[in-house]
Amino acid sequence: MGDLPGPHKAGLRSAGPRKAGSRKADPRETSPRKSAPREAGPRETGPRTGRVPAAYAEAARRSARVTLAGTAGFYLFLYGLDAPVGATYAVFAAVSLAGLSRIPGTGRQRAAVVLRSLPACWVLIVLGTYLSVRTWSAAVGMLVIGFSLAFVAVGGPRPAGAAPGLQLMYILPCFPPYDPGALGERLTGATTGILLLVLAEAFLFPEPPAVPYRELAARAADLARTCAGELAGEPYALSEDSARATREASTGLRASKVPPADRPAGPSVRQRALAQTGLAARTLLGALRNLPPGHAATGPGPDLLRAVAIAAAETADLLRGAEPRREAHENLLRARAALLAGRDEGDAPEELRRDAAVLEVADAALAMSTAADLAVRGREAATMAAPGRFWYTDVWAPRLWWRRLAGHAGSRSVFFQNAVRISLALAATRVIAGVDTLPHGFWALLATLTLTRTTVGETRSAMRPALLGTLIGALVAAALLTLAGSDTVVYAAILPPLMLAAFTLGPVKGVGWAQGLFTVVVALLFAQLSPATWQIAGFRVLEVLAGSAVGAVFGLLAWPRGAHDELRRAGAVLLRSAAEVVVATTARLAVGGTREPTATAPGHRSLNHALVLAESAYAQYQSEPKGMRAGDDAPDWSAVLIVGHHALWGADRLLLPPERSVVPPLGATAAAALDRLGDRVAGRMLLVSARTDPTDDTPEPPVPLRDPAFDGFMAQPDGAPRRYYAAAAWLDSLLTGLERITTDSPSPAVITKPADA
C-alpha cells in the first residue's frame, strides 16, 4: 500500500523564514513533473501548426511497419500455405500489437516489449480457444482477463501501451467455432505475425532516439556542480544564467516532459532509484537557487558547498557509466557532520537559519548521490542507502510488484476504476454477441475496446464520428465488394496501400477516419478468407453500433466523471495524511530519540500511498477533455501534490539524517514553539482538505491561511538548535504551498469552499 511510482514523485523546496504575510518565489519552480498548474494534457498541447507533419511522419513509419508485417504473414499463410486460420492470426497479431497498441519508445524498444509479450499471447490464445466452448465461459474469461490486462497499466507506460493489443489476442479466439484442433495453426500464425512485427520494429524506419532519463539526470547533476561552485566563492550568489538554467533543467526532468518510454515508471529497484535520482536532482537545484546571496559566505558553508559540487560531479560521471566511487559521497557526509558538530549555543539565529538552508542543500546532494548509485548498481548499493527514503532496496522484485498492484487494488484508484469499467463492458459485449449470435462478434468487442473512454462524455463524443466513419467505410467496402465480386486478386492488391492509409491517417485525423478506413480493411481481409458480399459491410456497422453502445452504457454506470471526482477525494486524503505527518514529525523532533535501523518518518506509508492515488488520478485528469474539468474555482492540483511530497521528504530529511545518528531532543522552549508551528500548519492543511473534498458539505467560514497576527515563523526561541530552524523553514514552505493551492479562490489568502465541491 505504501508504493510511490517513480515518475510521480515530487521534490521539496527550501523556504527560509520570512515575515508573516509576505510572498515567496513560486514554489512550482522545484516541483514535481506536474508542477505547472493547468498544464495542458495531450489534447491541449498548444497550436498544431508545424507539428502535424511530424505526427504524419511518425504515424507513417508505424503504419509501414504494421502493414509490412501484417500483410507478409497474411499472404504467406493464405496464398503460400493455404492456411486461412494462420493467415487470420498472423495479420491480427501484427495489427493488435502495433496498430491497436501504443507501445512507447523507439523501434528496438517496442520490439523488445513485443517479443516479451509473445508467451502472454500464447496463453491468451489457448484460453480463448478453450473458453469459447460456451458463451458463459468466454464471457467469464473476458471479465477476468480484461480486468487483469487493463490493471497491469500500473506497471508503467509500456505495459499500459501493450494491454489493448493483448486484449485482442484473447478476443479473437474466444468466438465460435470451438475448434481446439486448430490451436496449433492459430499459435503458429500469431507467432509468425509477432516475429515479423519484431523484425519490422527493430530494423525498419528507425526513429532518432530521445535523450535517456539517466543523461537528463546527469546534466542536472553537472548543473548542480556549477551552481554549488558559484555559491561557494565570491560573490557567493548564482548568476542569472545559472538560475535560469536550474529552472529549465528542473522542467526537463518532469515526467510530462520525458518520452513515455524513457520515464522511470516501473516498480523495480533500479527504476525507482532512477526516478528518485531525478527528484533529488530537482530538489537540489531548487535548494541551490533559493539559497540567498551571501548565505554561505562565512563559517563552514563554503566547504560544505564545495563538497556538494564534487559529489554532484561524481554523480554525473556515475550516471554516464563511470566506475562507481564513494569518495565524494563520504567527503560530503564528513563536511555535513562538521557543520553539525558546531555548538548551537551562542550562535545567532541568523547563522542557524543560514546553516539550516545549507544543510538542506547537502541533504539533497546526498540523496541524489545515493539514488544514482542504486540506479546504476541496483541492490549491490543497498548497504549504503538509508532505509527511510530508500525503503525499497531491501524488498525483492515480486514483493515490489505486489506492493504496486496492492496499492491500486481499491475503488479509489483510477487504474482500478478503468480496469473494472472496460472488463465489464467487454464481458457484457461478449454475452450479447453470443446470445444474439452476431456473425462477426469480435468486431463488437473491438469497438467496445477502442471506443470506451474514461468519462461518459468522452465516450459519447467518440461514438458519433466513429459511427459516421464506420457507415462511410461500410458504403465504400460494399461498393468494392460489389464491383470486384469474387476476384481476390483485386483485394490482395488493394489491401497493403489501404492498410498503410488506415494506420497513417487514423491516429492523426481521429476516430472517425480510423473506424472508416479500418472497416474497409477488415472487409477486404475477410473477402479473401471466404466468399463475401456487400452484406459484410452492414454487419460491421451493426456490430460497431452494438459495441460502442455497450461502452457508453458502462461509461455511464461506472465512474462517469472519470478522474474529476476521484482527484478531489484523493487530494483531500493527501492533505489530511500530510497534516498527520506534520504533527507526528514535530512531536518526534521535540522529544528526539535514537533512530531505528529500519525507521521511516511517522505516517510515511499512508502519505506515500495517498500520493500514489492522487498522482495517478491527476495524470488521468490531465488527459481527459477540458469540459470534464472543474471551473476556475478548482484547486491547483499540482500544488497539492507538491505539498504532499514536500511533507513526506521533509519529514524523512529531518528525522532520518544520512549519518544514522541520534536525534537529540529540542529544549522546552523550542519544542513548544515547534509544536505551535506544526499545529498551525496542520490545521490549515485540514481546512484546505475540506475545501477540496467533494463529500464534505460542511459550511466553513473564511479563514486566513497566513494570519498577519501570527508571528511563530519568525520566533527565535532561546537555545533553539539548527534542527528547530530547519523544521521551521520546512513548515513555512508547506504553508506557502497551501497558498499556491488556493490561488484560484476569490482571495488567495482565504480558504473558502467552492460551489461545485
Image: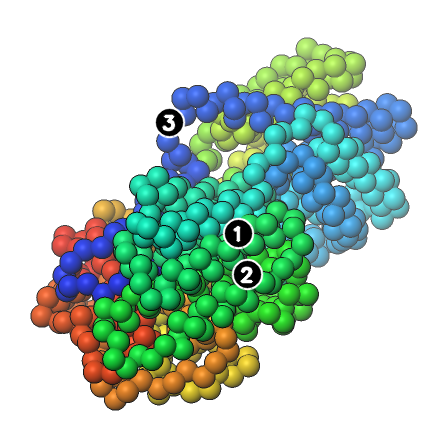
Q: Please tell me which of labels 3 and 1 falls first in the chain.
A: 3
Q: Position of residue 624 (x, y in %)?
A: 41, 44
Is 81 drawn above or below residue 715 in the view shown? above
For residue 614, side relative to residue 745 (left or right): right
Q: What residue sits 44% from the left and 32% below the top?
A: 464
Residue 43 vs residue 363, the one in the foreground: 363
Q: What residue sits 28% from the left and 82% below the top?
A: 345
Q: Position of residue 87 (x, y in %)?
A: 80, 31
- Residue 399, can we see it? no
Q: Position of residue 611 (x, y in %)?
A: 43, 63
Q: Please tell me which of labels 1 and 2 falls first in the chain.
A: 1
Q: What is the distance, in whole Å, between disc 2 and disc 3 at their CAs? A: 46 Å
Q: Mark 2 is on which residue type? A: Ala
Label 3 or label 1, whichever lies nearer to me, is 1
Query: Label 3 belongs to which residue?
Result: 47
Residue 689 vs residue 400, the one in the foreground: 400
Query: Label 1 belongs to which residue?
Result: 313
Whether tag 1 and tag 2 are in contact, CB under 8 A, the answer is yes
Any mark on residue 328, and which? 2
User: How many other residues sit within 10 Å of disc 1, few (<14), some (14-19) or many (≥20)?
Assistant: many
Any mark on residue 403, and which? none
User: How many other residues sit within 10 Å of disc 3, few (<14), some (14-19) or many (≥20)?
Assistant: few
Determine the image quadrant of residue 401. bottom right
Badge 1 marks a residue whose secondary structure is: helix
Q: What is the distance, in whole Å, between disc 1 and disc 2 at their CAs? A: 9 Å
Q: Mark 3 is on which residue type? A: Pro
Q: Please tell me which of labels 2 and 3 falls first in the chain.
A: 3
Q: Mark 1 is on which residue type? A: Ala
